[in-house]
């Protein structure tokens, strides 16, 4: 019987162990999509206790606590940090089978040397042990990044952001990690969402030009893309809760934008046309600059209206959506490809039933001499579990080239989440190891080791055009 989370955790055979320990384990990390704060990185934010660094903003953990009957006061409310930590410890002792159970123990072990299996009884000891390190050794945001062997961090940034801290970090020669912005123009696409008009005003403010027409909007977006590019941005990201596509013209999109600015009702069909034209336009901007475009699809957000009114977004009340993506996504990508302006693209769906759809669709738009131009993105959010990662990689291998995969990302607001790269690499090595043990692939350690290293780091280093 294996010990709980020993050195060979998730590694079932000798091949898997060799691939992980000799090839994957020590590879650096390129975190090409996350939600870390550039301000907190620049200021090297420090923490007074384990709850601050471990539970603040982590909706994965919050969801489990609520499922365990923890009152909201001890999740996001007014309870003390110690009482929140204790409530989480009580939850962990009954959370077997959850990836959060394994991630949390990896975080305790890798960053703080805590080997104990957390529970209500030993929670006070763990609390004191970790807090002594946080306050006594000056662990800060930068320290966690460096300790994790991260080379590049891509944050998620609105087009109206000043990128003040990205620019300061570029000038900081003592910090060895690149912290780069990612262009996330969702607020400019969600024409029916509350706050659209205010965002347009903010866009006008940062560009110094009026944005009262659609032409002016497109010009402002291009201006901000160019600004992001000047600060090192080479990645965009779009949250497409549904994938829009409708045949349209610039004249139609202009008229729809004018209606929205005037406060008139915009129908779903009109919204779809507006989004289609704008996304195709943005794709062209990205392609011209050699950027990588990312589509995160099929999240059903803010499902609990009462809790959304109380806590706001990104607090643990989102779920998988089941909107169809195959036809609209194919047509959207084709609209860019017809003009030869389809950029390198990474596709993610929160609904795992779309794995085969994405796996086959990316094959329709590969080419141009670019290895893995179209990527099936890492198992995302509710799918970045052991089974979810295996399913994503098998679908990619079934329909394309797993060996060209750009690998894992954190997609997190926590500086401790880099252990997810270890989790992913162990699962990757075990999957390939099983294939070897079953005689499905050759037992060529050098070949397989190179593939593992590439998926862990080298493919991303080649794929993303970071300076």
Image (cartoon, helix red, strand yellow):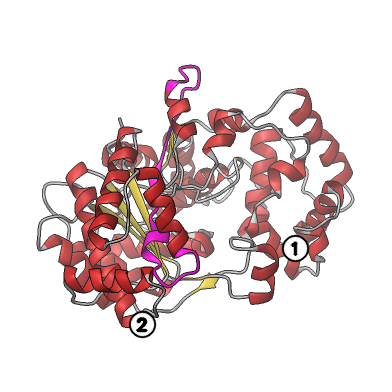
Q: Earlier in the sequence, mark 1 or mark 2?
A: 1
Q: Nearer the viewer, residue 397 or 53?
A: 53
Query: What segment carries the magenta color?
Result: 171-196
Asked if residue 148 can be seen in this view, the reply is: yes
Question: Residue 251, relative to residue 225: is it above or below?
Answer: below
Question: Residue 128, relative to residue 176: is it above or below?
Answer: below
Residue 223, position as x, y percentages in the image: 28, 44
- Distance of label 1 from label 2 (alpha carbons): 39 Å
177 in the magenta segment: yes
Residue 65: image tag: 1
Question: Residue 337, relative to residue 449: is it above or below?
Answer: below
Residue, x 82% and y 61% (percent of image)? 73
Q: Is residue 3 left or right of residue 201?
A: right
The residue under label 2 is: 267
Q: Secondary structure at mark 2?
A: loop
The quarter in which the C terminus is drawn is: top left
Q: Nearer the viewer, residue 326 or 203?
A: 203
Residue, x 67% and y 49% (percent of image)? 104
Residue, x 42% and y 25% (percent of image)? 170
Residue 132, position as x, y percentages in the image: 81, 29
């Amino acid at each position: 019987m294996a010990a709980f989370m020993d050195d060979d955790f998730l590694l079932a055979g000798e091949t898997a162990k060799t691939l992980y320990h000799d090839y994957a384990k020590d590879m650096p990390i390129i975190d090409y999509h996350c939600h870390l704060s550039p301000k907190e990185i620049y200021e090297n934010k420090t923490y007074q206790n384990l709850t601050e660094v471990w539970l603040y903003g982590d909706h994965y953990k919050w969801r489990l606590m609520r499922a365990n009957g923890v009152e909201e006061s001890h999740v996001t409310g007014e309870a003390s940090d110690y009482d929140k930590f204790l409530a989480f410890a009580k939850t962990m002792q009954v959370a077997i089978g959850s990836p959060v159970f394994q991630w949390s123990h990896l975080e305790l072990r890798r960053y703080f040397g805590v080997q104990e299996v957390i529970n209500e009884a030993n929670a006070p000891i763990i609390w004191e042990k970790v807090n002594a390190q946080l306050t006594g050794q000056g662990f800060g945001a930068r320290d966690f990044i460096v300790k994790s062997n991260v080379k590049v961090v891509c944050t998620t940034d609105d087009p109206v952001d000043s990128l003040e801290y990205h620019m300061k970090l570029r000038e900081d020669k003592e910090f060895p990690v690149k912290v780069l912005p990612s262009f996330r123009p969702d607020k400019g696409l969600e024409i029916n969402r509350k706050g659209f008009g205010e965002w347009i005003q903010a866009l006008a403010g940062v560009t110094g030009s009026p944005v009262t027409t659609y032409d002016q909007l497109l010009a402002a977006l291009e201006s901000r893309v160019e600004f992001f590019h000047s600060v090192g941005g080479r990645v965009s990201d779009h949250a497409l809760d549904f994938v829009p596509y409708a045949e349209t013209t610039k004249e139609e999109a202009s008229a729809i934008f004018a209606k929205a600015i005037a406060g008139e009702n915009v129908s779903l069909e009109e919204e779809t046309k507006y989004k289609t034209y704008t996304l195709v336009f943005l794709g062209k901007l990205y392609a011209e600059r050699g950027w990588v475009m990312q589509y995160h699809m099929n999240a059903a957000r803010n499902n609990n209206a009462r809790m959304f009114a109380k806590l706001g977004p990104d607090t643990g009340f989102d779920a998988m959506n089941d909107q169809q993506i195959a036809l609209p996504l194919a047509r959207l990508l084709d609209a860019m490809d017809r003009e030869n302006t389809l950029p390198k693209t990474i596709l993610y769906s929160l609904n795992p039933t779309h794995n085969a759809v994405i796996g086959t669709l990316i094959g329709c738009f590969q080419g141009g001499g670019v290895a893995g131009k179209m990527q099936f993105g890492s198992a995302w959010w509710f799918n970045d579990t052991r089974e979810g990662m295996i399913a994503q990689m098998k679908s990619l291998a079934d329909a394309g080239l797993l060996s060209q995969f750009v690998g894992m990302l954190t997609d997190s607001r926590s500086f401790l989440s880099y252990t997810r790269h270890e989790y992913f690499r162990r699962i990757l090595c075990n999957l390939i190891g099983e294939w070897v043990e079953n005689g499905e692939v050759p037992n060529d350690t050098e070949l397989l080791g190179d593939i593992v290293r590439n998926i862990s780091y080298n493919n991303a280093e080649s794929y993303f055009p970071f300076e």
